[in-house]
Image (cartoon, helix red, strand yellow):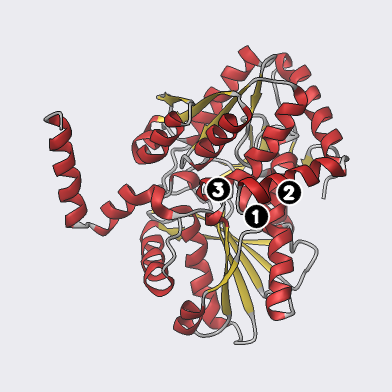
Amino acid sequence: MNTREGYYGQWGGAFIPEVLYETFRELRAAFHAAKQDPLFWQEYVDLMSTYSCRPTPLTGADNLSDHFGGARIFIKREDLNHTGAHKANNVMGQGLLVKRMGKKRVIAETGAGQHGVATATMAAKFGFECTIYMGEEDVRRQRPNVFWMEKLGAKVVPVTDGSRTLKDAINEAFRDWVGSMDTTHYVMGTVCGPHPFPEMVAWFQSIIGIEARRQILDRIGRLPAAVYACVGGGSNAMGIFQGFLSDPQVELVGVEAGGRGLDSGEHAARLAGRDASAGVAQGYKTMFLQNGDGQMRDTHSVAAGLDYVGVSPILSNLWESGRVRFAAATDAEVITALDLTMKQEGIIPALESAHAFVQAFKDAPRLRPEDAIIINMSGRGDKDIFTIAHAFGDPSWKKFIMDRGAEYAAGK
């Protein structure tokens, strides 16, 4: 897939300031040495099987399958990972790499907060100092995750620049790294940024696809007709897609944030929409939501983790080549799919993951009963309780919040 190191077709690269060249050279060397060492991968797998929950299950969604007809629906349960999402796969792998490099501090950006919680967890386990950058808007939306990051010992820094979301948190993390690179490793949370981050994060997340391919063959004796994953930066999507990239009969479907609609201007659909164009920002070349002057547009999604202006250069290449189909799910469709999944299966997807469910539910009835599809459930929805309760207009939850607020104000 790479025509030159760090590139995927025309996408990728490492557009970095000169002050970071040596840091990136050191990181590339350490990563490539680890990647060539089978003992490192085995150490990683052993860690994830004892500290997390690997292999995560592949759950047959029988009730949803009956509800829609057509294909059998299976759910890859990354929500059962330690910290509640696929993010643990990447951060624990990078934690082992940090130990190899001998650094003592880690920094990270986070949107939905799951990457921040996972990084803070990894730092606590390995004894690293930890700082997490998070857009002020996402701090407001994801207060439970902020609470856990702080209790795990991390310093959470709200970013007030720009749209106060994920892209701004990434910018601030890079600023920190420029001034602390001798002792600090930047734990990039997704398959974006300058080389080697896309390759590195994709490698650690590939454990999802390796497992899912083996599990579906064990369950039904054949490959699925399609695999679905939500796409913000794209780490969970690349994780599961890598298990099936070499199988052209398996359709790969990435689902972006349609927000309030692709015609509204309030969305985060880069590859499924019409508002993105090629550009270079945050150290790499990909498709960005930007205006004609190259200024990044504001984005919107009910899911904080999909509210990002760019997308993985690997996915841009797979989109351009036609290997991955991209769709978008609106906020309203996401809430409907979430509600149905909870009531049919007793499973609560994260708002990010629910985007993948939307498109899978649209496609399943058009497939044959002997077909199977896999939805990658990248995380669990308990982190989204405030947003979900608000979306449902739940009066008892509103009363609970008001009562608790009054008790806090009274010092109880």
Type of amino acid at the residue the image marks with label 3: His
Left or right of 319 in this view: 303? left
Q: Which mark is residue 21?
A: none
Question: Toward which corner of the image does residue 14 lie, by quadrant?
Answer: top right
Residue 82 percent coordinates (x, y):
55, 48
Q: What is the quadrant of the C terminus in the image?
A: top left
Residue placed at 51% from the left, 51% from the top?
269
Residue placed at 62% from the left, 34% from the top?
188
Type of amino acid at the residue the image marks with label 2: Val
Residue 33 percent coordinates (x, y):
86, 34
Whether residue 304 is visible here, answered yes or no, is: yes
| Residue projecting furthest to the front | 50
Q: Are marks 2 and 3 in contact (CB under 8 Å)?
A: no
| C-alpha distance separating marks 3 and 1 | 9 Å
Closer to us: 10 or 397: 397
Residue placed at 34% from the left, 51% from the top?
385
Q: Are marks 1 and 2 in contact (CB under 8 Å)?
A: yes
Q: Which residue is mark 2?
A: 45
Label 2: which secondary element: helix
Q: Which residue is mark 1?
A: 54
Q: Which residue is mark 3?
A: 82
The mark nearer the N terminus, 3 or 1, is 1
Type of amino acid at the residue the image marks with label 1: Arg
The mark nearer the N terminus, 2 or 3, is 2
| Residue projecting furthest to the bottom | 369
Residue 371 percent coordinates (x, y):
64, 82
